[in-house]
């Protein structure tokens, strides 16, 4: 790193890099986009021109050899997350990996242990931890506003056109469908707010088994596009019996809209009241009182952005711009050694639940989530 600046390489230039990572890094004065990598030469050239990046590669191994690259963002199909992350760690690079972290729980365990042993900063891209209302909701739960959490209701229902989703509809590339795509964010936030999920039971469906390509060719899909599941948290978390949660996830909920226009809700029901978050209102939460009233509570300014983020929360589309704080937080963790980010450990815990839900759906039974204790040996200091 040069004069408290972090040189970053971005590997994978699809939608998530263009909408989240590259804009986020560009807004961070302490980050410099040094290199880009993508196997699509035309896209690589276009993005490099847009962001004025002169170092471009079609092979990630070559990007990792660049001496000015201190950290990498990995935004590729899930199949490539582990091999690229391991190579980056071996090269001494700090690593931010898109969710879901890996193809399987076993794979994410190896990624986590390698990152710890390598002494690099590691982060899983759980963007929803940076939603202002979600950050404030977590704070209110921690303050005991609604008492002990008894029940959670989580919903992400969208109406995607039943056309090709590319690699995301192929299990050998994506690992899973809706459970790992939209479900991962919600599982992680439940872990962050309440604690570890202990067991699950669920159903999955592939309602659109063929999604045609733009030229009309049939393109089979073998991942779930909808899922419902129940989760029970570890004993002693929340009320005596353990908090419980329900998840409703779908890409084929007709009429619900796509992306920021879809239904996105997170509700916490406690012994003293209720907290409700809606994506359409990222700067407020609803507080339910025992008398039946719902109070609209504005998110205080200190929760509107990640600490010290230069982002102006009043500018831009609020359901999009909060995501830029994610990359800012990654850079700050590298520079300051802070740990206020979702790490590979969190990605590993989430993957344990994803695998358990998919197993439950296959075997039609409750499945225990593997215990995932953190590595007990000291984490090496972050490399400069």
Image: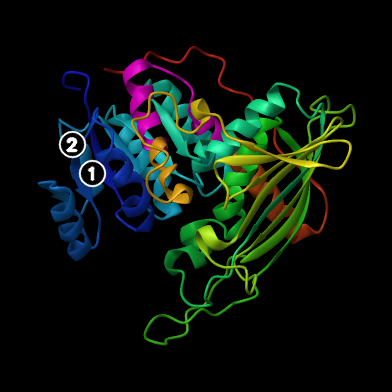
Q: Quarter-wise, where is residue 336 in the image?
A: top left
Would you place residue 193 above or below residue 97 in this image? Answer: above
Is residue 124 something one can see in this rendering? yes
Near-viewer residue (375 or 192): 192
Residue ID at (42%, 51%): 317
Residue ID at (16%, 52%): 48
Label 2, residues with CA under 10 Å away: few <14, some 14-19, many ≥20: few
Would you place residue 298 above or below residue 308 in this image? Answer: below
Q: Given contact means CB atoms under 8 Å apart, are the residues at marks 2 and 1 in contact?
A: yes
Quadrant in the picture for the N terminus: top left
Residue ID at (90%, 31%): 241
Q: Inspect the magenta stretch and tell me whether residue 319 lies in it.
A: no
Q: Secondary structure at mark 1?
A: helix
Q: Is residue 9 left or right of residue 235?
A: left
Near-viewer residue (118 or 167): 167
Tag of residue 381: none
Mark 1 = which residue? 61
Q: Residue furthest left?
A: 54
Q: Inspect the magenta stretch and tell me whether residue 335 lies in it.
A: yes
Q: Is residue 210 left or right of residue 313?
A: right
**x and y, in percent, of residue 141 in the image:** 71, 28
**x and y, in percent, of residue 87 in the image:** 32, 37
Q: Quarter-wise, where is residue 299 in the image?
A: top right
**x and y, in percent, of residue 315 in the image:** 37, 44
What's the coloring here?
A: rainbow
Label 1, residues with CA under 10 Å away: few <14, some 14-19, many ≥20: some
| Range of magenta residues | 326-346
Mark 2 = which residue? 65
Near-viewer residue (307 or 52): 307
Is residue 192 something one can see in this rendering? no
Task: Measure the C-alpha gap from mark 2 to mark 1.
Answer: 7 Å
């Amino acid at each position: 790193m040069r004069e408290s600046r972090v040189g970053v390489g971005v590997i994978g230039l699809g939608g998530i890099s263009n909408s989240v990572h590259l804009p986020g890094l560009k807004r961070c004065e302490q980050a410099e986009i040094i290199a880009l990598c993508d196997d699509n030469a035309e896209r690589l050239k276009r993005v490099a021109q847009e962001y004025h990046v002169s170092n471009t590669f079609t092979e990630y191994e070559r990007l990792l050899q660049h001496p000015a690259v201190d950290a990498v963002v990995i935004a590729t199909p899930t199949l490539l997350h582990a091999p690229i992350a391991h190579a980056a760690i071996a090269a001494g690079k700090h690593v931010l990996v898109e969710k879901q972290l890996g193809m399987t729980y076993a794979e994410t365990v190896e990624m986590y242990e390698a990152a710890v042993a390598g002494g690099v900063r590691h982060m899983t891209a759980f963007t929803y931890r940076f939603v202002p209302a979600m950050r404030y909701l977590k704070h209110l739960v921690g303050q005991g506003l609604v008492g002990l959490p008894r029940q959670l209701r989580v919903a992400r229902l969208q109406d995607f056109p039943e056309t090709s989703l590319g690699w995301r509809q192929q299990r050998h590339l994506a690992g899973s469908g809706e459970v790992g795509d939209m479900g991962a964010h919600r599982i992680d936030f439940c872990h962050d707010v309440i604690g570890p999920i202990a067991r699950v039971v669920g159903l999955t469906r592939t309602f659109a088994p063929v999604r045609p390509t733009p030229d009309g060719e049939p393109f089979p899909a073998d991942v779930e596009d909808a899922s419902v599941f129940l989760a029970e948290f570890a004993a002693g978390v929340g009320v005596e019996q353990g908090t419980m949660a329900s998840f409703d996830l779908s890409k084929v909920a007709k009429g619900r809209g796509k992306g920021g226009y879809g239904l996105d809700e997170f509700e916490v029901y406690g012994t003293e009241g209720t907290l409700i978050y809606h994506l359409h209102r990222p700067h407020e939460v609803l507080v339910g009182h025992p008398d039946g009233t719902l109070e609209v509570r504005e998110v205080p300014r200190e929760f509107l952005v990640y600490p010290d983020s230069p982002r102006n929360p009043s500018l831009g589309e609020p359901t999009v711009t909060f995501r830029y704080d994610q990359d800012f937080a990654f850079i700050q963790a590298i520079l300051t050694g802070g740990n206020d980010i979702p790490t590979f450990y969190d990605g590993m815990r989430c993957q344990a639940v994803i695998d358990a839900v998919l197993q439950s759906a296959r075997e039609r039974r409750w499945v225990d989530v593997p215990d995932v204790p953190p590595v007990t040996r000291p984490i090496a200091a972050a490399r400069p």
